[in-house]
Image (tube, rainbow, N blue to C red):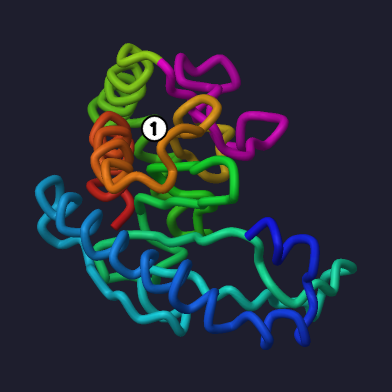
Amino acid sequence: MRDLAANNDKAWFEAHKDVYQTQLQAPAVDFVVALGERLQTLDPTILIDPRTNGQGNLMRIYRDVRFSQDKSPYKTAVAGIFWDGVGKKMQSPAFGFHMEADRLELMAGMFQFTKPQLTAYRESVADDTSGPELDAALKTIQSAGGYEIQGEQYKRVPQGFDPDHPRADLLRYKGLYAVPSGGVREGLSDPALVDVAFNHFRAMAPVYDWLKKNLT
């Protein structure tokens, strides 16, 4: 990945494609299968799909440069996402990973709600039952230590909701997810990384569970 970052062009990649396939892609497939099987103990509907064409858990290495000023053709990270397979991959509550040369970043939740999901999310946050349940889920994650709740937010509480609502801050989110602070930086090539990642996902699962219950 470091070499690719320094030589991000088609000629270099094609000359080293066998290294990518054997030393990065194949272990990534094994990682997805092993971690997916662990995640199914949290949610049996989690999909394990080791395809490498972007339709399964793994993201493609090829960048979409159509609307980007950065025309580098390849991603310099291995990324993937686990969802229940019912909805679309990027529109479902999920567990995700993003591995660069020096760290592994993990998340549980959703980066961005669709319009119908955003409506359902706000109504659920304002609800007297599901709203406190979200509060409790986030406090459970934060009490475990070393986790942050993130997500892009609107500047103001959405129209139609009380600006002084006790969960006004939650009402402003466009997406909601938990991450381990600083990511994982040790043991990235150790088989025990599967256990490390799973333990983080398990600690962050309350936000995944709440989003799945209320948005799908």
**In the figure, 148 relative to 183: above or below?**
above
Is residue 168 a member of the stretch shown in magenta?
yes
On the rendered structure, is 107 left or right of 47?
right
Quarter of the view holding residue 158: top right
Foreground residue among 180 and 174:
180
Which segment is the magenta one?
146-170
Name the secondary structure under disc 1: helix
On the rendered structure, is 8 left or right of 209?
right
Quarter of the view holding residue 186: top left
Foreground residue among 211 and 108:
108
**In the figure, 143 relative to 190: above or below?**
above
Q: Which residue is mark 1?
A: 125
Q: Position of residue 147 (x, y in %)?
A: 43, 23
In the image, farthest residue toward the right: 69
Quarter holding the C terminus?
A: bottom left
Residue at (32%, 12%) from the top-left corner? 143
Residue at (67%, 37%) from the top-left corner? 154
Residue at (30%, 39%) from the top-left corner? 201
Q: Main secondary structure of the magenta part?
A: loop
Q: Position of residue 58 (x, y in %)?
A: 42, 69
Quarter holding the N terminus?
A: bottom right
Foreground residue among 71 and 134:
71
**In the figure, 66 relative to 118: above or below?**
below
Is residue 145 a member of the stretch shown in magenta?
no
Q: Position of residue 44 (x, y in %)?
A: 10, 57
Q: Amino acid at mark 1?
A: Val
